[in-house]
Structure formats: structure tokens, C-alpha cells
Image: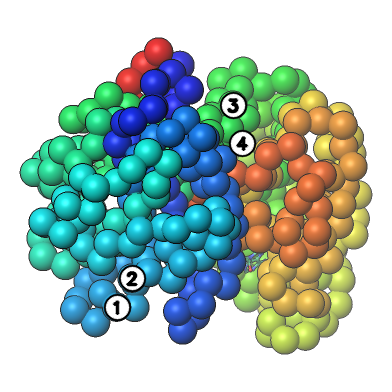
């Protein structure tokens, strides 16, 4: 068990909190504030405990000079200030005198946001390569470090691993919640444990498949990646997306787990993403057709397995849910899963968007906030941004 923010006396302390404010923006306007809102419990708790709160986050990527202004955290500071209903001091610097002075004059219960940690990537990628001096420097600005940025926990950066190596450390409420729901799934799931996988490519999900195929009782496979499995069985899949280099892998996996892996039996096809053509059995796909969604028989088949489940993990939409003609399968499975009396965990960025788009987010047990991080967690990997935190 990792130490959490609750394990520390915060009053009068300079608490460095690594949050995930990597929000989508258009022309300086925040288009989705989910990540900011999700960091509030930790920030508010620290303020209630009379800490001096110093926030660090990255935003986008900084490779060249012109990325700097585009990725400033200034609009986030303003937005956060409205949410917290108090002033947020913003320092447009990631190091130096101005920053140090602003931190040293912080009062208990005040909040300061440091500029985008990836400004340090411009020369020498110091943040992203976990430059040891940078981690040490940032650590010198505070008394204590709390990591609450789950979305970057799979990366070894100066603003997580670097700081944590130089200060007493704990996790915030957001990471605590992620661990609470995701840990049992990869260690000791309540059974039957049914995993639903989709998305476009097998290659993106090999790690997840390898880890979960062992653990799960059933692995239901939809989305674009189903076609590589189907083709590996000698079926005609037309122009559907196929990972040629993983055909052998899929074939072997099906041989090893013939009763565990459940593939689609029908599909919705089209010739382009604009318009669907027809629904047919997977044995009936024509050479020039593309499978873009699972068909209704497959939804029914998947439902039979989902009905048994005590734990459900879903990663990857089962069709091109961004297009109206191919969203039905994903939407139906959202509804079916939402109605189940089971532990329902959603991982992956697009899967989370789909569940929100179809408005079933409230009925899920947990929607993981970290796209890449939740995938790596489901692969059974240790995340460096969590591993670096002190144990209780
Ligand atoms: P997540 O972000 O939840 O891990 P992925 O990124 O793996 O999910 O997959 C999401 C993408 O997979 C979506 O953009 C969707 O359009 C695509 N996809 C799903 N089914 C198909 C299909 N049959 N053909 C091509 N792409 C598909
Ligand atoms: Mg994705």
C-alpha cells in the first residue's frame, strides 16, 4: 500500500501536487474540464488542511519555440480559480527567482500553479527524460510531494519520479481511487471475470490480451481487431482492418484458448466510414466490404457472457463509434453493461469517451481517467509514477 495525502500533516507545509491538467484546448479555451474537476478533491483537501499548495502539470508537447505559448497553463489557472472560488497564483516559469519568490511568499491556504512542466523539454527534454537535476530542483521548492496525475503515471518524468526520489511522498485521491478499482482486477478479480476488448489494432492491445487472457474467464473481442483473429481462421474479411504481422499470434492464441476467446458472428459492413451497407454473418463478407461494427447477433452472444459476470472490464469500442452508422454495437454494449449488477470497469481514452457520449457513465463502477496508464496497468505492469511513492 502506498502512502496517501491523508498520511501527512499538511498544515503550514509547502505541498507539491502533481496533477493532470493536460486538458483539450481550442484557441486558448478549455473544451473538456474533466481532468481539472477530477483533481479538485486532492487540492481542496490540502487547502482545508491549511497547506501551501503548489501545483505542477504538463500540457501537450513542447518540441519547439512555437509550442510554448500554445501550451501555456495560464487559461487553466484562470479556470481553476473559478472552480475553487479563490485566487490561483500563476507563475509563467518552471524555475528561477520569480518562481522561488512566489513560492516563498505563499500563505497557508493559497494555491500556486507552475507553468507547464514540459517547457523544460525545449532544451534537452529535461522533464520527459527525468533529468535528475530538474527533479531535485523542483523537490527543493516544497516540503512534501503528492502525485495525483494518473494519466502520466506510466511515464518516468522529472515531475513525478524525479521529485518523488527527493521528498517524502504520497498519492492523491484520484490515484487512490484508480488503484482501488484497478488493482483487484489484475490481481484477484471476482469471478466470473469477463473482458471485452475492441479498438482498431491488435498490436495496440497485445500486452493487455496477454495479461488478461490468463486471468479472465472469457475474452470477448470486437472492433477492428476482431478481423485479424477472424482472418487467422481463414475467413474472408474484405477490406476490414487487419494486422498482417499479428495473424500468427492470433491463430496461436485461438488454438491455446478456444473456449475462452469469443469472436463476432456478424458485422455491419460498408465501403467507407460515411455510410453503412448491410449487416451480414462473418462468413459472408465480400472482398470489397469493410467491417465497421459488430452486428446484433454478436451483441446478443456477448450479452450471454456478460450476464454471467461478476467483474467486467471493457477496453476498446467494438465499432467505429464516432460515426452514426457504426455506433450501434458500442452503444448497445454500454447499455447492457450499465444494467449489470457487477463490478464494471472502463479503461482506455476512446472507451471512456464512448461511455460518456452515450450517457452511461453514471452507471459504471469506475471509468479510468488514464488512457495509456490504465492500459499499462491492465497489462500487469508497474507504473513508475506510482512505484516511486513511499509505501505505508
Ligand atoms: P481505447 O482508447 O479505449 O483504448 P482504442 O484507441 O484502442 O480504444 O480504439 C478506438 C478506436 O478503434 C476508435 O477510434 C474506433 O473508431 C476504432 N475502431 C473500432 N472498431 C473499428 C473497426 N471495425 N475498424 C476500424 N476501426 C475501428
Ligand atoms: Mg484510443
Secondary structure of the residue carrying numbered label 1:
helix
Looking at the picture, tell me which residue is in the foreground, 355 or 55: 55
Quadrant that contains the C terminus: top left
Q: Quadrant of residue 2?
A: top left
Looking at the picture, tell me which residue is in the foreground, 271 or 314: 314
Q: Position of residue 329 (x, y in %)?
A: 81, 61
Report if the beta carbon of the residue with label 3 is closer than 8 angstroms to ligand 1.
Answer: no
Task: Judge from the rendering whether residue 82 lies leftward or rightward of residue 12; answer left or right.
Answer: right
Name the disc covering residue 72, or none: 2
Report if the beta carbon of the residue with label 2 is closer than 8 angstroms to ligand 2.
Answer: no
Secondary structure of the residue carrying numbered label 2:
loop
Secondary structure of the residue carrying numbered label 4:
helix
User: Would you name the residue on which mark 4 appears?
Assistant: 255
Task: Mark yes or no: residue 108 visible.
Answer: yes
Nearer-N-terminus badge (4/3): 3
Q: CA distance from mark 3 to mark 1?
A: 37 Å
Please rate how many residues cluster around mark 4, counting C-alpha atoms within 10 Å: few if below 14, some from 14 to 19, many from 20.
Answer: few
Task: Judge from the rendering whether residue 130 lies leftward or rightward of residue 90; answer left or right.
Answer: left
Nearer-N-terminus badge (2/4): 2
User: Would you name the residue on which mark 1 appears?
Assistant: 69
Amino acid at each position: 500500500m502506498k502512502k496517501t495525502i491523508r498520511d501527512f500533516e499538511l498544515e503550514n507545509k509547502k505541498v507539491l501536487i502533481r496533477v493532470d491538467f493536460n486538458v483539450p484546448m481550442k484557441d486558448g479555451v478549455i473544451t473538456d474540464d474533466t481532468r481539472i474537476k477530477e483533481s479538485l478533491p486532492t487540492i481542496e483537501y490540502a487547502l482545508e488542511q491549511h497547506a501551501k499548495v503548489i501545483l505542477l502539470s504538463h500540457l501537450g508537447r513542447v518540441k519547439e519555440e512555437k509550442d510554448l505559448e500554445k501550451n501555456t497553463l495560464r487559461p487553466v489557472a484562470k479556470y481553476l480559480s473559478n472552480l475553487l472560488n479563490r485566487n490561483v497564483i500563476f507563475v509563467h516559469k518552471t524555475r528561477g527567482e520569480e518562481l522561488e519568490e512566489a513560492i516563498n511568499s505563499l500563505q497557508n491556504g493559497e494555491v500556486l500553479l507552475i507553468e507547464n512542466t514540459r517547457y523544460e523539454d525545449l532544451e534537452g527534454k529535461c522533464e520527459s527524460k527525468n533529468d535528475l537535476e530538474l527533479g531535485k530542483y523542483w523537490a527543493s521548492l516544497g516540503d512534501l510531494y503528492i502525485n495525483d496525475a494518473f494519466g502520466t503515471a506510466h511515464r518516468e518524468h522529472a515531475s513525478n519520479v524525479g521529485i518523488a526520489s527527493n521528498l517524502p511522498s504520497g498519492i492523491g485521491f484520484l490515484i487512490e481511487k484508480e488503484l482501488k478499482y484497478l488493482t483487484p482486477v489484475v490481481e484477484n478479480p471476482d469471478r466470473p471475470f469477463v473482458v471485452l476488448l475492441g479498438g482498431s489494432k491488435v498490436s495496440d492491445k497485445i500486452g493487455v490480451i496477454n495479461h488478461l487472457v490468463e486471468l479472465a474467464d472469457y475474452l470477448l473481442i470486437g472492433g477492428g481487431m476482431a478481423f485479424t483473429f477472424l482472418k487467422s481462421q481463414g475467413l474472408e474479411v474484405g477490406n476490414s482492418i487487419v494486422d498482417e504481422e499479428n495473424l500468427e499470434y492470433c491463430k496461436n492464441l485461438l488454438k491455446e484458448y478456444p473456449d475462452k476467446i469469443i469472436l463476432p458472428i456478424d458485422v455491419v459492413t460498408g465501403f467507407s466510414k460515411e455510410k453503412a451497407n448491410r449487416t451480414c454473418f462473418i462468413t459472408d463478407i465480400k472482398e470489397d466490404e469493410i467491417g465497421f461494427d459488430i452486428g446484433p447477433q454478436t451483441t446478443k452472444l456477448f450479452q450471454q457472457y456478460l450476464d454471467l459476470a461478476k467483474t467486467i472490464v471493457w477496453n476498446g469500442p467494438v465499432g467505429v463509434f464516432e460515426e452514426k452508422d457504426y455506433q450501434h454495437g458500442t452503444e448497445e454494449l454500454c447499455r447492457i453493461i450499465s444494467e449489470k449488477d457487477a463490478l464494471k470497469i472502463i479503461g482506455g481514452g476512446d472507451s471512456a469517451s464512448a461511455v460518456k457520449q452515450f450517457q452511461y457513465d453514471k452507471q459504471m463502477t469506475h471509468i479510468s481517467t488514464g488512457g495509456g496508464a490504465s492500459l499499462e496497468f491492465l497489462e500487469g505492469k508497474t507504473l513508475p509514477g506510482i512505484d516511486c511513492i513511499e509505501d505505508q
